């Protein structure tokens, strides 16, 4: 079997590429600009190109055909329109990575299925994903374009840990605050439910849909089965670090109001996503992929990630602006308590 990945070196796609090559024996090709190529399994073939250079990519793909084309970096409709032109006659299955954040906010039920309405008034990223899905499914219905939609939720790997509130440089500054005994901001009261998935587990579900005729014309959410509160997520991280968690709960609406103007998109990422309790019903996926299961619990995945982050200084991206912002938010709220 032969697959082409648009992207292929990100948090989710790298685990899929490794599983295809190391465990399933697929022939794997990538189109990307060459990032993280040194981490790819031996034998992966890379077409170094900017996918947006449609004429060049079309020439490089002349005479090639793939069982599956996987799109991981298509965020707007023009990207999937481009893909349709490039791949409509070159694959038996086109798999598009959408997002579970596309589900209605707030949903009528915290139990999420593939039939949950798609609508997110808070996050343009999610609305664009919905538009991409609509374009692709229209092509399936009218022309038979062999699309499969995949909706991940919060997936992480050995280079990052799941958090609700962090700066633009990622999780390191929050880890550092924990290590320094400083309070860590958690959205809401910390009791809302969230699902986190290690990328190796996601890869089990995704590869099970590749070449699967029951997946054509269908949408699948892929997550693990472990659901935690945000307090439990942060406590698990603190336990893995061997430190006391000093949780500081802040309303998501407040974080949105005081964060967006500093370049932190908490309106989208919190109110449009992580502030809402969700539990994913994965029965549809498991009917199509009986092998799908959680093999890496969150406490295990966090230790894998933290061991890797702490041993690789290049992953420790300081964010003093976010650190100072957290201190200001906490100080302002403490002052407001005294004023009442």
Image: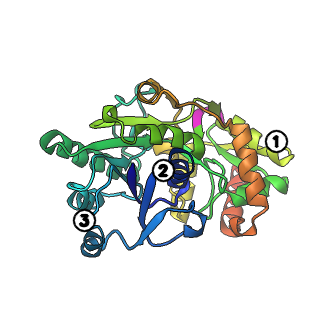
Q: Quadrant of the C terminus?
A: top right
Going from N to C along the chain, the mark reached first, 3 or 1, is: 3
Going from N to C along the chain, the mark reached first, 2 or 1, is: 1
Residue 318 colored in magenta in the image: no
Q: Secondary structure at mark 1?
A: helix
Mark pair 2, 1: CA separation: 29 Å
Q: Nearer the viewer, mark 2 or mark 1?
A: 1
Q: Does residue 104 appear in this view?
A: no
Return the residue at label 2: 267
Magenta range? 190-195
**Count of numbered circles on the image:** 3
Task: Return the residue nearer the eye: 319 or 162.
Answer: 162
Q: Secondary structure at mark 2?
A: helix
Task: Return the residue nearer the eye: 223 or 6.
Answer: 6
What residue sits 55% from the left and 52% below the top? Answer: 18
Labels 3 and 1 touching (C-beta < 8 A): no
Indicate which disc residue 311 carries. Answer: none
Q: Is residue 293 above or below residue 31?
A: above
Label 3 Cα crowd, 10 Å radius (few <14 / some 14-19 / many 20+): few
- Residue 74 quadrant: bottom left
- Residue 7 quadrant: bottom left
Label 1 Cα crowd, 10 Å radius (few <14 / some 14-19 / many 20+): some
Label 2 Cα crowd, 10 Å radius (few <14 / some 14-19 / many 20+): many
Q: x, y (%) of residue 332?
A: 69, 54
Q: x, y (%) of residue 45?
A: 45, 65
Indicate which disc residue 63 carries. Answer: 3
Return the residue at label 1: 239
What residue sits 21% from the left and 46% below the top? Answer: 145
């Amino acid at each position: 079997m032969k697959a082409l990945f648009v992207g292929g070196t990100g948090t989710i796609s790298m685990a899929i590429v490794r599983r295809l090559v190391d465990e399933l024996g697929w022939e794997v090709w990538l189109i990307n600009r060459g990032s993280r190529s040194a981490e790819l399994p031996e034998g992966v073939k890379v077409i170094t190109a900017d996918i947006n250079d449609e004429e060049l990519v079309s020439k490089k793909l002349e005479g090639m055909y793939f069982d599956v084309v996987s799109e991981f970096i298509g965020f707007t409709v023009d990207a999937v329109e481009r893909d349709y032109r490039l791949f409509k006659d070159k694959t038996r299955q086109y798999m598009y990575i959408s997002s579970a954040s596309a589900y209605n906010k707030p949903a009528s039920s915290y139990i999420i299925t593939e039939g949950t309405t798609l609508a997110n008034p808070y996050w343009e990223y999610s609305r664009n994903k919905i538009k991409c899905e609509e374009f692709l499914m229209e092509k399936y219905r009218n022309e038979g374009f062999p699309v499969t939609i995949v909706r991940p939720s919060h997936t992480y790997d050995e280079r990052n840990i799941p958090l609700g509130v962090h700066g633009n440089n990622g999780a390191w500054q929050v880890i550092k605050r924990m290590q320094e005994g400083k309070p860590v901001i958690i959205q809401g009261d910390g009791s809302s439910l969230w699902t986190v998935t290690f990328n190796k587990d996601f890869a089990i579900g995704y590869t099970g849909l590749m070449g699967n005729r029951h997946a054509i014309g269908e949408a699948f959410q892929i997550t693990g089965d472990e659901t935690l509160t945000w307090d439990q997520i942060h406590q698990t991280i603190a336990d893995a670090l061997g430190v006391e968690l000093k949780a500081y709960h802040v309303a998501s609406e407040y974080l949105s109001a005081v964060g967006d103007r500093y370049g932190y998109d908490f309106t989208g990422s919190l109110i449009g996503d992580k502030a809402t309790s969700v539990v994913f019903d994965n029965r549809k996926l498991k009917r199509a992929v009986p092998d799908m299961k959680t093999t890496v619990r969150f406490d295990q995945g966090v230790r894998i990630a933290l061991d890797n982050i702490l041993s690789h200084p290049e992953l420790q991206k300081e964010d003093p602006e976010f650190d100072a912002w957290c201190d200001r938010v906490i100080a302002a709220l403490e002052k407001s308590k005294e004023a009442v």
